[in-house]
Amino acid sequence: MVVRSTTVAADPARVHALVDDFHQWQAWSPWEGLDPDLRRTYSGPASGVGARYSWEGNRKAGAGSMEITGSTPGTVDIRLAFLKPFENTNRVTFTLTPTPVDGAPGTTVEWRMSGERTGFWGLVGRVLPMDRLIGKDFEKGLARLKAAAEA
């Protein structure tokens, strides 16, 4: 399991809008820029439950898909399926908690990913825990999300 959090000086609705709409992820995702020719496909509703995003790119970006499976003002749940370089499915949850910042609206954002590690990822997990493997990416993404929400 990988968990990171940060506090953002922005209303929870503003943060929710950035997470609940895959079109907005280009503004903050830590994996943006891994492949300048990344192919993106969006389907389903523009945001919220049923919204889907798939990508296919170079070796660094890989290929996969995400689908929003739950969305409330305080949470966004996502099914994340990696196809390349290795197959794996994870559950991603963003929890948004109202947290005043200097007397103004703010939000504590928790980004959590969990899933079963099988096959290749099971072997990698014995040597290099997922937290160490992608924790820094979560930190970078939360910093970018904070900047986008506060802009």
Image (cartoon, rainbow, N blue to C red):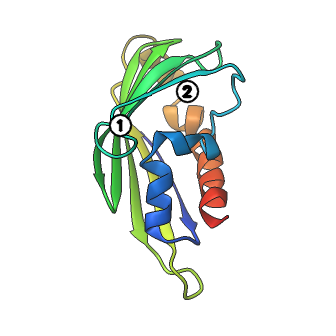
Q: Quadrant of the N terminus?
A: top left
Decide which of 95, 40 is in the foreground and name it. Answer: 40
Label 2 and label 1: CA atoms lie apart by 32 Å
Which of the 4 image quadrants contains residue 60? top right
Amino acid type, label 2: Leu
Q: Which x, y percent locates residue 18?
A: 51, 52
Which residue position is annotated with label 2? 128
- Residue under the image location 58 percent in, 31 percent down: 133
Amino acid type assigned to the residue bearing label 1 in the image: Ala
Q: How many marks?
A: 2
Q: In the rendered image of this protein, does residue 10 appear above or below residue 45?
A: below
Q: Residues within 10 Å of mark 1 (few under 14, many from 20)?
A: some
What residue do we see at 35% from left, 50% from top?
76
Q: Furthest residue to the bottom?
A: 103
**x and y percent of residue 142 in the render?**
59, 52
Rendered view: 57 above or below 144? above
Q: Position of residue 35 (x, y in %)?
A: 69, 22
Q: Residues within 10 Å of mark 2 (few under 14, many from 20)?
A: few
Quadrant housing residue 104 = bottom right
User: Vertically, is 53 above or below 49?
Assistant: above
Q: Is residue 30 left or right of residue 15?
A: right
Mark sitting on residue 51: 1
From what the image shows, is residue 83 above or below residue 49? above
The answer to which quarter of the image holds residue 80 is: top left
Point out the image quarter for the C terminus.
bottom right
Q: Nearer the viewer, mark 2 or mark 1?
A: 1
Which structural element holds mark 2? loop
Which is nearer the N-term, disc 2 or disc 1? 1
User: Where does the image place residue 46, in percent across and percent down from the top left?
Assistant: 40, 41
Kind of element beneath mark 1: loop
User: Measuring 41% from the left and 40% from the top, which residue is drawn there?
Assistant: 113
